[in-house]
Image: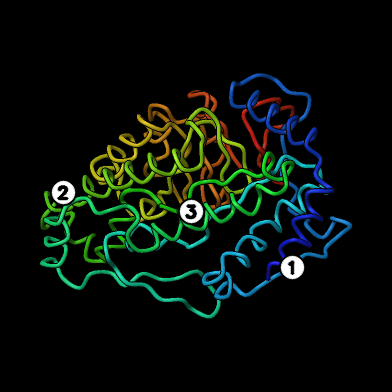
Amino acid sequence: MKHVLKKYLSKLDAMLDLEHQNRAKSVCQQVFDMQDVERLPFINTRLSEAADQHWPQYPYNDTFVDPGKMLLDQLRAPFIHNQLRDYHPLNIRSNYGTVIMPSIFGLGNQLTETSLPWVHHLESREQVQALIERGVPNVRNGLGGRCFETAAFYQEMLAAYPRLSKAISIYHPDLQGPFDVSHLIWGPDIFYALYDCPEVVHRLLRLVTETYRQFMRSWKKAIGEGNDFTTHWNFYIKGGIMLRDDTAVTMSAAHYEEFVKPYDQALLDEFGGCIHFCGRGAAFIHSMCQSRNLYGINMSQPDWNDTPKAIALAAEHKLVMIGLAQQYVPAGARTGFIVLV
């Protein structure tokens, strides 16, 4: 594996276009500052257009247990997008899926043959109460520790290649959002608990949010970045965090206001950043856009949403629509969008 790593790290190091990446980051910063740009930053989704496709690929389960394979798997996107000269950052992550935060609380998980791991949620409200009573866990429990170890491995491997070490950013793992994590921990019964015992839901949310905060503080220190500007997925983003509100799309506007927004806001107040959601966000998009220290929205199913309304709300609150497909972007737009083409 060391020989394979050396071969491909050397290959990528030799072909990096650092000047283009500096320009790409600068343009994205201008867009988040709502300055007009000559051309909206774009992410090319036609990966086959890269002339050189020769990069190792491994089954996910192999990368889960081998940080060398995970590093190469993560570097495939920088390898492709460096050739495409789009606005995709050269970034990688500790790729252990949505189960990271639940594992920190001691929950089990399992790998499948075709996807990232699934969590084993708690089986009773008594178990939820017991978890709450234990208080904030060590953020290096479970896969939390693996995330830090893998990031340190990445840093060690990249250090031998000064250009790579400078160019490649390591973005924070998939911690979801506070309510999403609480849903993963509690399981589907949490939706009944919103009515039966809302005070217990709030106690769990406060615990998850504080654990999330402590993880992010430790992560920022380990990676050596602040909260002004970072990367996540395919994007340069303003702020230091990307929250996920996928579960919120199943909830009413009132439940979003009570159980989701305050805990997102607690993290945005400290780190600033952007929010992603899958599905239809009609119940909360207006309120979400009013969040403090929110700089962008990543809405992954525009065809399921009133996208013109979302665009208007984003413009009103000076938010960037991140990763919006080209056909939804208003003609003549000069800022406020990072586009998928």
Spatial distance from mark 2 to mark 1, Cα to Cα?
50 Å
Q: Check disc 1: other Cα within 10 Å, few if <14, some if 14-19, many if 20+.
A: few
Q: Amino acid at mark 2?
A: Arg
Please report the residue visible at 80 percent of the width from the left and 32 percent of the height from the top: 19
Reply above or below: 334 against 152: above
- Quick one: 58 or 34, which is closer to the camera? 58
Crowding around mark 2 (Cα neighbors within 10 Å: few <14, some 14 to 19, many 20+) is some
The secondary structure type at the circle numbered 3 is loop
Q: Counting residues from the N terminus, which is met first, the one under dot 3 or under dot 1?
A: 1
- Dividing the picture into quadrants, the one containing residue 190 is bottom left
Label 3: how many residues lie within 10 Å, few (<14), some (14-19) or many (20+)?
Answer: some
- Residue bearing mark 1: 3
Q: Nearer the viewer, residue 240 or 291?
A: 240
The image shows residue 98 at horizontal and vertical percentages of: 43, 60
Q: Amino acid at mark 1?
A: His
Q: CA distance from mark 2 to mark 3?
A: 26 Å
> Which residue is at the far bottom?
113
Residue 122 circle label = none
Residue 190 vertical position relative to residue 284 in the rendered view, above or below: below
Residue at the image position 59 percent from the left and 54 percent from the top: 154
Viewer-proximal residue among 174 and 179: 174
- Please tell me whether residue 188 is drawn above or below residue 300 in the rendered image: below
In the picture provided, is 185 more to the left or to the right than 40?
left
Q: Could you tell me residue 294's position as x and y percent? A: 44, 31
Q: Which structural element holds mark 2?
A: helix
Picture coordinates of residue 101, whole percent (x, y): 35, 57
Q: Quadrant of the N terminus?
A: bottom right
Q: Which mark is residue 278?
A: 3
